[in-house]
Image (spheres, rainbow, N blue to C red):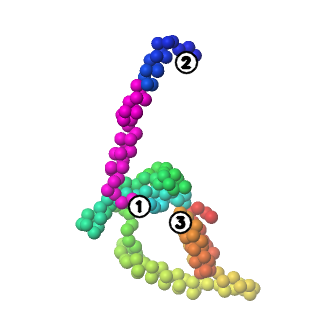
């Protein structure tokens, strides 16, 4: 725009003035879009959570509709990034943006299952049974393989036949407690997907 004629200047000025006048008169699409979104999510229950995919720990907002107490099955119908979360500030990667597909997936595991040795199918068991089985197996293995000291007489108090894989999207406090519990068992093999 090195050279602009008087006619072009007047056209540009008139179109700018008309556009700003229409926006001030209420014809701007921004408030209408915000009101539509607010109306769409108005009757839903908002829940803050952490994305389950990786170790980044992005914050998500999940919107549910329905109430089990009022004969309407509760269901999550919308998931988006949490704009107030310090990690992702409202953005989500492609996997995080597809969390709604995981929630409603037919192959999503909703309860513990057990497959007996030599069996060809899985059986549904309760959470109490699953946790009891894990505790029993851990105790059996620890009692059989715990080392109090080395052959040279050095005290080591370690349990090398079992390891623990933890979730790295947990808070610092949960990570600290998980580390303390794992080490108190004598477990040395301890890792998570963040590799810290």
Q: In the depicted view, which residue is nearer to us: 144 or 111?
A: 111
Task: Residue at 53%, 14% (x, y): give it.
Answer: 4
Quarter of the image holding residue 62? Answer: bottom left
Pointer 3 or 2: first along the chain: 2
Residue 116 is situated, as x and y percent measured from the top left of the image, at 40, 78
Assess whether residue 27 is covered by the magenta stretch: yes
Determine the CA span between mark 3 and mark 2.
Answer: 56 Å
Q: Residue at x 60, y 76 (%)?
A: 180
Query: How dense is the environment of label 3, judged by Cα within 10 Å: few (below 14), some, or many (20 and up)?
Result: some
List the residue tagged with mark 2: 1
Residue 48 in view of the camera: yes
- Screen quadrant of the N terminus: top right
169 or 153, which is in the foreground?
A: 169
Secondary structure of the residue carrying numbered label 1: strand
Rendered image: mark on residue 47: 1
Q: Is residue 102 above or below residue 142?
A: above
Of labels 3 and 1, the one closer to you: 1
Residue nearest the viewer, comparing 159 with 117: 159
Q: Left or right of 104: which side holds 11? A: right
* Image: magenta residue range: 18-47
Disc 3 versus disc 2: nearer the observer = 2
Image quadrant containing the C terminus: bottom right
Q: Residue at x 49, y 17 (%)?
A: 9
Residue with the mark numbered 3: 170
Q: Say if the magenta span includes residue 121.
A: no
Which residue sits furthest right? 152
Residue 126 as seen in the image, left or right of residue 70: right
């Amino acid at each position: 725009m090195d050279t602009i004629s008087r006619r072009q200047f007047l056209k540009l000025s008139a179109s700018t003035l008309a556009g700003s006048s229409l926006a001030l008169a209420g014809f701007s699409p921004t408030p209408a879009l915000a009101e539509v979104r607010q109306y769409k999510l108005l009757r839903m229950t908002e829940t803050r959570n952490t994305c389950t995919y990786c170790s980044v720990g992005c914050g998500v907002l999940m919107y549910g509709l329905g109430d089990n107490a009022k004969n309407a099955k509760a269901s999550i119908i919308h998931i988006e990034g949490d704009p107030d979360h310090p990690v992702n500030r409202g953005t989500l990667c492609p996997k995080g943006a597809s969390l709604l597909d995981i929630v409603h997936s037919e192959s999503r595991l909703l309860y513990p299952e057990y497959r007996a040795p030599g069996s060809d199918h899985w059986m549904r068991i309760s959470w109490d049974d699953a946790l009891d089985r894990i505790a029993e197996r851990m105790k059996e293995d620890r009692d059989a393989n715990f080392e109090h000291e080395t052959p040279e007489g050095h005290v080591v108090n370690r349990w090398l036949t079992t390891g623990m894989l933890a979730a790295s999207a947990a808070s610092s406090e949960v990570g600290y407690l998980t580390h303390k519990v794992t080490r108190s068992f004598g477990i040395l093999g301890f890792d998570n997907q963040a590799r810290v």
